[in-house]
Image (spheres, coloured by chain):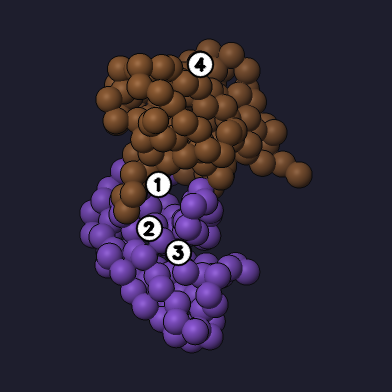
Amino acid sequence: DAKTTQPNSMESNEEEPVHLPCNHSTISGTDYIHWYRQLPSQGPEYVIHGLTSNVNNRMASLAIAEDRKSSTLILHRATLRDAAVYYCILRDFSGNTPLVFGKGTRLSVIA
Amino acid sequence: DGGITQSPKYLFRKEGQNVTLSCEQNLNHDAMYWYRQDPGQGLRLIYYSQIVNDFQKGDIAEGYSVSREKKESFPLTVTSAQKNPTAFYLCASRYVFGQGNQPQHFGDGTRLSIL
């Protein structure tokens, strides 16, 4: 799977939107973009994924650049419960390889 | 409710002992995975299994062993050959192996410490 680059940490105020960036300049045409998050002392949980078009679900939105070399996870109103490590991961279309986790972005939310 | 159950949540081991971590899933998932996480680090893959009675080594398999005798179960044994076993161990599973858009589901982890 191609590599992703994320900032080590970010900070947000509660109830404000958060934009978490991810660069993946070597993405192939068949790679899905997945986002997971890990709350303290828990296993990661799936947040959202996309291929080419922007995606929305109840947790977040995913904005994918037109050239697909970067993407942004958007939390519309950050809460204290959103404080976690967020991982951006590329997954081959076939899904025949396990997820490869980097260090992710540690998001702090300030009340 | 469907999910992945890891037990125990905390485990202590004396040096020189083997210890087995349990992972059970009732999601009817085909593929199962074991990851290790050290403080402040991302997850590293130990072993994974795509089907029953078959498994592959991940990036850090040395000192670990697994079995996959049933679809629902994928136990991990940390052997005495693993020199630094203290870590947070996470089990995961995934439905329909072979499709990149399927999410991976994780258990709540087992924290292993050496006495």
Residue drawn at x 53%, y 13% as measured from the top left: B53
Q: Within the image, what quadrant is residue B102 found in?
A: top right
Whether residue A6 sits left or right of residue A60 in the image: it is left
Residue marked by disc 4:
B67
Q: Which of marks 1 and 3 is in front?
A: 3
User: Which comes sooner in the sequence, label 1 or label 3?
Assistant: 3
Amino acid type, residue under disc 3 in the picture: Ala
Regarding mark 4 in the picture, which secondary structure is present there?
A: loop
Amino acid type, residue under disc 1 in the picture: Arg
Q: Quadrant of the N terminus of chain B?
A: top right
Q: Nearer the viewer, residue A12 or A32?
A: A12
Q: Nearer the viewer, residue B8 or B34?
A: B8
**Looking at the image, do the residues carrying marks 1 and 2 touch, with CB atoms under 8 Å apart?**
no
In the figure, what tint was chain B given? Answer: brown
Q: Nearer the viewer, mark 3 or mark 2?
A: 3
Q: Residue A11, relative to residue B55: is it above or below?
A: below
Whether residue A61 sits left or right of residue B37 in the image: it is right
Residue B73's spot in the image, x, y percent?
A: 60, 24
Residue marked by disc 2:
A88
Residue A61's spot in the image, x, y percent?
A: 51, 71
Residue B44's spot in the image, x, y percent?
A: 34, 39
Residue marked by disc 1:
A91
Q: Which of marks 2 and 4 is in front?
A: 4
**Both labels 3 and 4 in a single chain:** no
Residue marked by disc 3:
A84
**Looking at the image, do the residues carrying marks 3 and 4 touch, with CB atoms under 8 Å apart?**
no
Residue drawn at x 48%, y 58% as measured from the top left: A40
